[in-house]
Image (cartoon, rainbow, N blue to C red):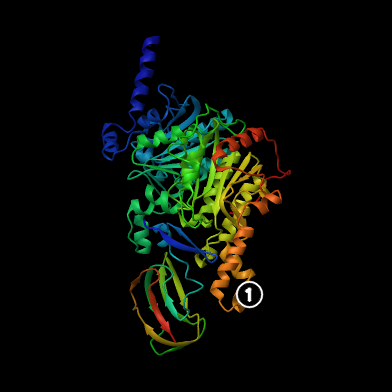
């Protein structure tokens, strides 16, 4: 063969494999409203940046007729590319090839690209669309999953890991996304569950649809497994590209800074957001928007445990992580789910050098049998643990209520906050005036000829004395009581002052966070 | 959604309570009435060992519930007399369905 012929033969070979499962299978994929694995990679990455690896990998399975069957690229496309000009490793399972089933070589391709990502210190994005283990390959398929989970764990905290669910992801396969930092799902396309509706029906006699059991909406609002939801694959890729604006490539880097842009104060005026009555709700995201660059807040897990709000924003051009109590939902209380949500976000930010800004307005922990039995002690402890452990710059702004255990948990000075600001409207106390008066003045109220009147007097007395920021400020627990109008200026000042903070934890293997 | 009130440590706050939270299954186990035997898991009743009016001891076998490929022995948590049996052999039962009442 001449060199030209050799090259032509290589080209033909490549083009055949690139057709994946063939035209009929691709047609079927489109009919389901899904893109192909190649479409997806092209939509996600910057134009013409994709370099494919391991295109010619083939399985070596012999049983159940697999020896006579060729599977294009063994059902998964892997390679390197760029997102917003930042390097990234990527893989996409190809549902048109044997249902995207995972066999030994399929898994090897994934672990190879993950190993490269860890070595190169670049994020990895995994697009999941697979029927599950390739049963014909038996225990080799299981070994493949195990190898992936092992790398997910090793890579955790080294590089950001992103999972995109664009099809079924069932059984053991769900644990790779579960081990990664962010999970993206699309309505009517994505499914995740350990046991599917059919098994549940046979074994337990309970009827439930795929979408209801493990669809995007379910994981976004009920289980908290999905961090982002959208209506189309294209929208999901936009969300991922947006998320990349806030992430460094690995734990050694700090996230990229950009130009500082003033917030849109015509739309968000700090002082007009807070209601006169401290028992009335408002949307904490309006306060966030009134302070951060461009008034742009990129919220994470917005559908689940909404009594706490977490997400990314820029402050003076620097990416920061925001954790804020949300008085609009459940008065902003801390509970099992909101503690889990905030704790995991704090740990992500700490892993990747993203400074933390916390907004405090919460009356305490949610009371109730349901919460106690769900382990609010164990779960609530996670928030204390992650804030204490975080060595990134930590800034806290107390807006209104900071009562009891919640005051401590919400990145107080005591957990190592570098800068604690309070508005003059802050109420830092062991509990609200009503509760405190009932306990402290119980006898006086009981013995009074007019207990209701007496209670009111005592509540007023307590409010004037304790429901303010000055007692905490007098002890040095609050660094400065600030003018709400100057919040942005002061936060930027504090952030820039502490940005190069160096802090390390006592020598240890690793801590033991209450899980 | 409409605004509702929530009471935290004697203080009422105005706020929104998400439906998903209201619909959440509360945990009955430790607070439920011990004299009402309910299914803890959906399954099929494969045998019943008692009849109405029988005297039962703590730990006495009441029935067998086949679920999750296992034969689960349901034992009496209290001493008393069987007041009413709501199921018969071969019935499939839902989760938390009342089976036997003891007095």
Residue A337: % across, % down: 50, 55
In the displayed structure, does residue A421 sit left or right of residue A134? Answer: right
Circle 1 is placed at which residue position?
A: A444
Residue at the spot 66% in from the left edge and 35% down from the top edge: A498
Residue A430: % across, % down: 63, 60
- Residue B49 seen by the camera: no
Q: Quadrant of the C terminus of chain A?
A: bottom right
Residue B54: % across, % down: 42, 89
Would you place residue A197 above or below residue A168 in this image?
A: below
Would you place residue A377 above or below residue A513 in this image?
A: below
Would you place residue A72 above or below residue A12 in this image?
A: below
Residue A404: % across, % down: 61, 59
Q: Chain of mark 1?
A: A
Residue at the spot 51% in from the left edge and 42% down from the top edge: A180
In the displayed structure, does residue A488 sit left or right of residue B2? Answer: right
Q: Front-most of A392 and A229?
A: A392
Q: Front-most of A456 and A422?
A: A456
- Label 1 SS: helix
Residue at the spot 62% in from the left edge and 36% down from the top edge: A495
- Residue A412 seen by the camera: yes
Number of marks in picture: 1
Task: Mark 1: give few (<14), some (14-19) or many (20+) Cα within 10 Å.
Answer: some
């Amino acid at each position: 063969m001449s060199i030209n012929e050799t090259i032509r033969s290589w080209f033909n070979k490549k083009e055949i494999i690139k057709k994946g499962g063939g035209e009929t299978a691709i047609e079927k994929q489109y009919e389901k409203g899904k893109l192909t694995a190649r479409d997806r990679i092209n939509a996600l990455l910057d134009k013409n940046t994709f370099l494919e690896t391991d295109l010619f990998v083939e399985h070596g399975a012999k049983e159940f007729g697999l020896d006579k069957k060729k599977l294009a690229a063994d059902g998964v496309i892997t390679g390197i590319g760029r997102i917003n000009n930042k390097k990234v490793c990527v893989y996409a399972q190809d549902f048109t090839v044997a249902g995207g089933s995972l066999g030994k070589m399929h898994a090897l391709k994934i672990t190879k690209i993950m190993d490269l990502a860890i070595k190169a210190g670049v994020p990895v994005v995994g697009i999941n669309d697979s029927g599950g283990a390739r049963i014909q390959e038996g225990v080799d398929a299981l070994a493949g999953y195990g190898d992936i989970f092992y790398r997910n764990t090793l890579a955790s905290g080294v590089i950001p890991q992103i999972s995109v669910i664009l099809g079924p992801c069932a059984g053991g396969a769900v644990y790779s996304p579960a081990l990664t930092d962010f999970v993206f799902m699309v309505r009517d396309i994505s499914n995740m569950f350990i046991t599917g509706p059919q098994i549940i029906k046979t074994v337990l006699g309970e009827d439930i649809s795929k979408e209801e059991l493990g669809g995007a909406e379910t994981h976004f609002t009920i289980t908290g497994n999905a961090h982002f939801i959208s209506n189309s694959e294209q929208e999901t890729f936009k969300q991922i590209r947006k998320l990349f604006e806030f992430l460094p490539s690995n734990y050694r880097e700090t996230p990229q800074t950009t130009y500082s842009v003033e917030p849109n104060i015509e739309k968000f005026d700090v002082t007009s957001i807070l209601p006169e009555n401290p028992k009335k709700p408002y949307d904490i995201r309006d306060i966030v928007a009134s302070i951060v660059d461009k008034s742009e807040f990129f919220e994470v897990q917005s559908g689940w445990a909404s009594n706490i709000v977490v997400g990314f924003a820029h402050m003076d051009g620097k990416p920061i992580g925001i954790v804020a109590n949300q008085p609009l939902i459940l008065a902003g209380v801390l509970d099992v789910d909101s503690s889990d949500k905030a704790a995991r976000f704090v740990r992500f930010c700490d892993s990747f050098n993203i400074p933390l800004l916390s907004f405090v307005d919460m009356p305490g922990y949610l009371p109730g049998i349901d919460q106690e039995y769900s382990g609010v002690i164990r779960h609530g402890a996670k928030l204390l643990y992650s804030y204490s452990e975080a060595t990134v710059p930590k800034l806290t702004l107390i807006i209104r209520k900071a009562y009891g255990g919640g005051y401590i948990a919400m990145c107080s000075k005591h957990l190592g906050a570098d800068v604690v600001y309070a508005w003059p409207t802050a109420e830092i106390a062991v509990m609200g005036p009503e509760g405190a008066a009932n306990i402290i003045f119980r006898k006086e109220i009981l013995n009074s000829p007019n207990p209701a009147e007496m209670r009111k007097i005592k509540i007023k007395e307590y409010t004037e004395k304790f429901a303010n920021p000055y007692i905490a400020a007098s002890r040095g627990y609050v660094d400065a009581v600030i003018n709400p109008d100057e919040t942005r200026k002061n936060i930027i000042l504090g952030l820039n002052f502490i940005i190069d903070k160096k802090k390390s934890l006592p020598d240890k293997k690793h801590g033991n966070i209450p899980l | 959604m409409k605004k509702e009130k929530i009471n935290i440590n004697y203080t009422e706050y105005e706020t929104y309570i998400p439906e998903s939270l209201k619909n959440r299954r509360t945990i009955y186990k430790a607070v439920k009435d011990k004299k009402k035997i309910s299914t803890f898991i959906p399954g099929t009743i494969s045998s019943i060992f008692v009849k109405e009016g029988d005297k039962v001891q703590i730990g006495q076998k009441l029935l067998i519930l086949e679920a999750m490929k296992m034969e689960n022995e349901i034992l009496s948590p209290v001493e008393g007399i069987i007041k009413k049996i709501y199921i018969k052999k071969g019935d499939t039962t839902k989760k938390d369905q009342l089976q036997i009442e003891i007095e």
